[in-house]
């Protein structure tokens, strides 16, 4: 079994070398491939990725135009060759030491998808108040619309069996990708786990890119992907029949 880790990158040059060293410092319990997608950064991010790719043995994909996190993630998913696919941000908000625990339920065949929750009771970090309440509100709406009970729909740390993820007809260009992924899972019979993770929130000054406009857009995405996209539209025919409702 192989794990593919998809890492979207946009204007992260000031800490990218340290982030990459940090990501590769954690041993993983199975074969892995790392796919970094530069979303037409205006700084030296792509140059740094190309420089370090041979040292750390990861793939680099370069978007021709800036399209958003969702578009970068979708391209990475399309190129992934592992049986498991995970999304990882190119910053220090999420700690790769949580990855082994997140993928274990899939290795043990107890789950088909695992969400890493920043809000489980045994996750101890302090959150930024504004982002905390926005995330909790969006998760509540997602739960009501999708029928899934989660504590953190907007988490970056999601691990999928590739047969599910690569069968999704994903279209979100920006941060709506998190809403779309969760809404589509609500349309099938996937076994979903949610485990606590460490989280170290950064500020706008530190490079955080999501803002209030993305929160408003997320509400629109919640309605659209949950109520106006049915299972046949959400998934290709390649989805194994055991996941069909």
Image (cartoon, helix red, strand yellow):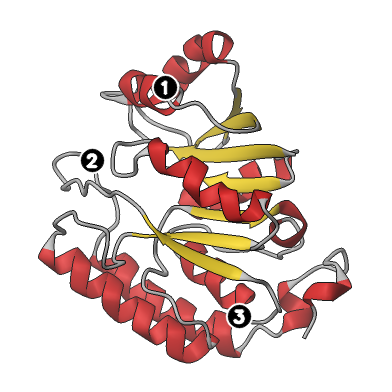
Q: How far is mark 2 from mark 1, CA to CA?
A: 23 Å
Disc 1 target residue: 25
In the image, what residue occupies the spot 35% across and 39% down? Answer: 95
In the image, what residue occupies the spot 54% across and 83% down? Answer: 224
Q: Is residue 240 above or below residue 53?
A: below
Say if residue 67 shows up in the picture.
no
Disc 3 target residue: 186
Give the position of the C terminus as an image quadrant: bottom right
In this image, 123 relative to 176: left or right?
left
Earlier residue among tags 2 and 1: 1
Q: Position of residue 63 (x, y in %)?
A: 57, 36
Disc 2 target residue: 207
Q: Is residue 217 above or below residue 10?
A: below
Determine contact: label 2, label 1, CB under 8 Å: no
Q: How far is mark 2 from mark 3, CA to CA?
A: 32 Å
Q: Position of residue 42 (x, y in %)?
A: 37, 30
Q: Secondary structure at mark 3?
A: loop
Give the position of the N terminus as an image quadrant: top right
Q: Is residue 144 above or below residue 74?
A: below
In this image, 207 relative to 12: left or right?
left
Label 1 vs label 3, nearer the camera: 1
Earlier residue among tags 2 and 3: 3
Bin the neighbour count of mark 2 within 10 Å (Cα to Cα): few under 14, some 14-19, many 20 and up.
some
């Amino acid at each position: 079994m192989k794990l593919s880790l998809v890492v979207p990158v946009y204007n992260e040059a000031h800490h990218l070398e340290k982030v990459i060293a940090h990501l590769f410092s954690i041993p993983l319990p199975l074969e892995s491939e790392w796919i970094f997608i530069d979303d037409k950064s205006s700084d030296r991010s792509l140059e740094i990725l190309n420089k370090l790719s041979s040292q750390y043995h990861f793939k680099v994909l370069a978007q021709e135009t800036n399209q958003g996190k969702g578009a970068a993630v979708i391209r990475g998913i399309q190129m992934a060759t592992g049986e498991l696919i995970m999304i990882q941000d190119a910053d220090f908000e999420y700690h790769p030491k949580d990855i082994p625990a997140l993928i274990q339920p899939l290795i043990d065949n107890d789950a088909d998808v695992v969400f890493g929750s920043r809000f489980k009771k045994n996750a101890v970090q302090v959150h930024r108040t504004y982002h905390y309440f926005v995330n909790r509100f969006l998760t509540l709406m997602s739960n009501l619309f999708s029928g899934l009970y989660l504590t953190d729909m907007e988490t970056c740390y999601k691990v999928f069996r590739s047969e599910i993820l690569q069968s999704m007809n994903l279209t979100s260009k920006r941060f709506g990708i998190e809403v779309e992924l969760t809404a589509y899972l609500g349309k099938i019979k996937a076994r979903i786990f949610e485990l606590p993770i460490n989280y170290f929130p950064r500020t706008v000054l530190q490079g955080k890119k999501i803002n209030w406009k993305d929160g408003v857009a997320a509400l629109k995405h919640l309605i659209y992907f949950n109520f106006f996209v049915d299972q046949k539209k959400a998934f290709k025919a390649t989805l194994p029949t055991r996941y069909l409702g």
